[in-house]
Image (tube, grey):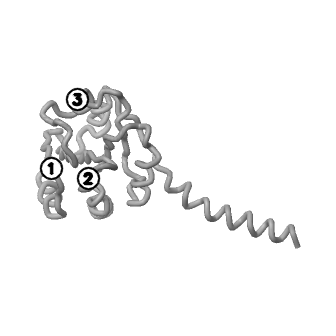
Amino acid sequence: MFTKIFIICFFVLLFISIPAQAEKVQLKHFVPGSYQQLLEKNADKPFMLAIWSTTCSSCMEKMALLNELKESRPEINIVMLSTDDVSVSDQIQTVLAKNELASLDNWVFADENAQRLRYEIDPKWYGELPRTYFLNKNHERQGISGSLSQEDYETIFKVILN
């Protein structure tokens, strides 16, 4: 009897842990040179760089919309970049997993000098969040600070896909 209970408990725990493992989010460390790496990885392809933080309420409110965009616009590669410190990676992973964004290319600032990382992305960006960059296949880009609506995204997607 004890053996049957043990086996049942083992399988229950196994099935409970499988979804949690599937939601594991890989966070790449964004360091000097990472922005160039993103450009090279997305050569000749349009993409969107969504910069956010766990402490940004507008960012958190728009996570569900980013998931919708991921599902409805697979032709746009969405790259997520958290400006939080790498020390809060668990919290970042939780937010991304909860919002079903684990499958995206996810990055986190991993350099003590966040200003240097921001400057590498855009010398005219001073850290306001959310910040979104839309890059066409030639990597001509448009950067927008602040919250965007579904309509805003769709309008800009039409431009970068042409």
Q: How crowded is mark 3: few (under 14 residues within 10 Å), some or many (20 or more)?
A: some
Residue at mark 1? 160
Measured from the top left, where is residue 80 in percent x and y?
A: 32, 47
- Tag nearer the camera, 1 or 3: 3
**In the rendered image of this protein, does residue 114 appear above or below residue 60?**
above
Q: How far apart are marks 1 and 2 (CA)?
A: 9 Å
At a point 16% along the width and 51% down the height, the residue shown is 146
Check contact, mark 1 vs mark 2: CB within 8 A. Answer: yes
Asked whether 53 or 137 is in front, the reply is 53
At a point 64% along the width and 64% down the height, the residue shown is 15
Element assignment for label 2 = loop
Count the labels in the image: 3
Check contact, mark 2 vs mark 3: CB within 8 A. Answer: no
Element assignment for label 3 = helix
Tell me the kind of residue under disc 1: Ile
What mark, if any, has residue 120 been given in the picture?
Answer: 3
Mark 2 or 3, nearer chain start: 2
Mark 1 or 3, nearer chain start: 3
Mark 1 or 2, nearer chain start: 2
Q: How crowded is mark 2: few (under 14 residues within 10 Å), some or many (20 or more)?
A: some
Picture quadrant of residue 89:
top left
Residue at mark 2? 76
Tell me the kind of residue under disc 2: Ile
